[in-house]
Image (cartoon, grey):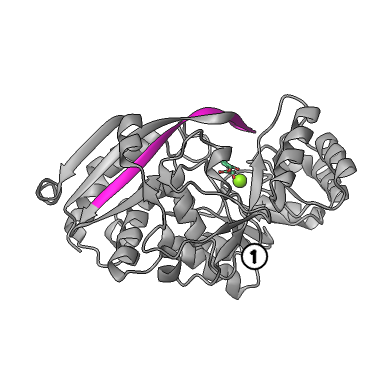
Amino acid sequence: MRIDGIVLRELHLPLVRPFETSFGVTRNRRILLAEIRSEGLIGWGECTAGERPHFSGESTDTAWQVIVNELGPMLASGRPEHGGDCPRIFNVVRGNPMAKAALENAIWDLEAQREGVSLSQLIGGVRDRIPCGVSLGIQKSIPELLDIIERELAAGYQRIKLKCKPGWDVEVFEKVRNQWPDIMLSCDANSAYKLRDADHLANFDAFDLLMVEQPLWHDDFYYHSMLQKRMNTPICLDESIRNRRDALAAIEMESCKIINIKLGRVGGFSEAIAVHNAAQERGIPVWCGGMLESGVGRSHNIALSTLENFRLPGDVSASARYWTEDIIEPEVTVTAEGEILVSDAPGRGYEVRTDLIEQLTVRKEEIRAFELVGQN
Ligand code: OSB
Ligand code: MG
């Protein structure tokens, strides 16, 4: 396909409520959107990098720089025919998966539109609805958390994930389990613990958690495998899994029993599908993580979640949990059964609200194709 133009935008979107993890609090999102024009069609991608390089080494600013100076020009001269061509085109740039994913996912969107199929159909999805869970940030107090859980369960969500850290863990799990002995409950430490906390972490086993997500270092498999031998609760890896090889290593080493797949963290649909397949072939279930996405990234997450081995509820939930107004139409909603119904319209299945996007844009860079190609 001919790339006629790439427009990069930064939007400022305040979250409905602050989101606190073991590495910090997010109040306002700086959303980076890539709009790719090709032969009369427009594809959209979202860069899921954080405002600061705390979840991974990327941030909104590093991704902006890499897309404008490196990836954008490469894509325009690389003439991709399929989303699956992007990893090869971007190959000489090391790392920067979230920057790459923003462009690659927009190409997958374009490819789906060109073929007249939904993104889910294009990637071989098998579900017309996906099961949803929620990820709940660290709160000021346990009673406040219990109120939020009550509300999310009433809304239908099938699984509650609690962000945790030393000082916000077993006591919290105990209170939650006392009130709801049977709900699907999990936790996510975002690397808040050390191996010397293994005895403490083994106490998590008392609460029948579906999993504990990324308890140890963000770049580790070895110590997670040591830890998994010392606790029954399945370990799920998020930050550590950057690609298919990582997934194979982690599974081989028994560092985890479950894998969280995030499109941005692994660099886009190609690698996400590769991780999914590697896990499926080895009997390891996966689920779709979230990065507080706007509707654009959320629509990609929904399509990804329709693959067969996405066997557990993901962190993909309703637009209204994050934004007073989302930038897509319709907004993402969840049924009383805690499911998102997957659109079968061509591409992402949701319209973008271009007027609202323009209004929220604080930075924009538009580069025409001949300039992009000229740079290479
Ligand atoms: O570890 O899953 C994570 C948000 C930002 C950074 C890391 C994570 C998260 C979430 C939020 O858990 C999931 C969501 O989008 O609701
Ligand atoms: Mg996580």
Q: Which of 144 and 23 is in front in this view?
A: 144
Q: Which of 375 and 11 is in front in this view?
A: 11
Q: Is residue 95 visible from the viewing direction of this image? A: no
> Residue at point 53% right, 72% down?
126
SS at mark 1? loop
> Residue at point 66% right, 54% down?
338
Please tell me whether residue 31 belongs to the stretch shown in magenta.
yes
Dot 1 surroundings within 10 Å: few (below 14), some, or many (20 or more)? some
| Lateral position of residue 90 relative to residue 181, left or right | left
Q: Where is residue 250 in the image (x, y as percent from the top left)?
A: 61, 60
Q: Is residue 86 above or below residue 293?
A: below
Q: Is residue 93 visible from the viewing direction of this image? A: yes
Q: Position of residue 104 (x, y in %)?
A: 34, 56
Which residue position is annotated with label 1? 311
Return the residue found at the far bottom: 281
Amino acid type at circle 1 is Arg
Q: Nearer the viewer, residue 134 or 162?
A: 134
Q: Is the magenta stretch mostly helix, strand or loop?
A: strand
> Residue at point 65% right, 67% down?
284
Q: In this view, does 202 lie above or below 105?
A: above
**Quarter of the image where one finds residue 146:** top right
Q: Position of residue 213 (x, y in %)?
A: 67, 49
> Residue at point 58% right, 44% down?
218
Q: Position of residue 267 (x, y in %)?
A: 42, 54
Question: Which quadrant of the picture is home to ligand 1?
Answer: top right
Residues rendered magenta in the picture:
18-36
Q: Is residue 308 above or below residue 172?
A: below
Please tell me whether residue 177 belongs to the stretch shown in magenta.
no
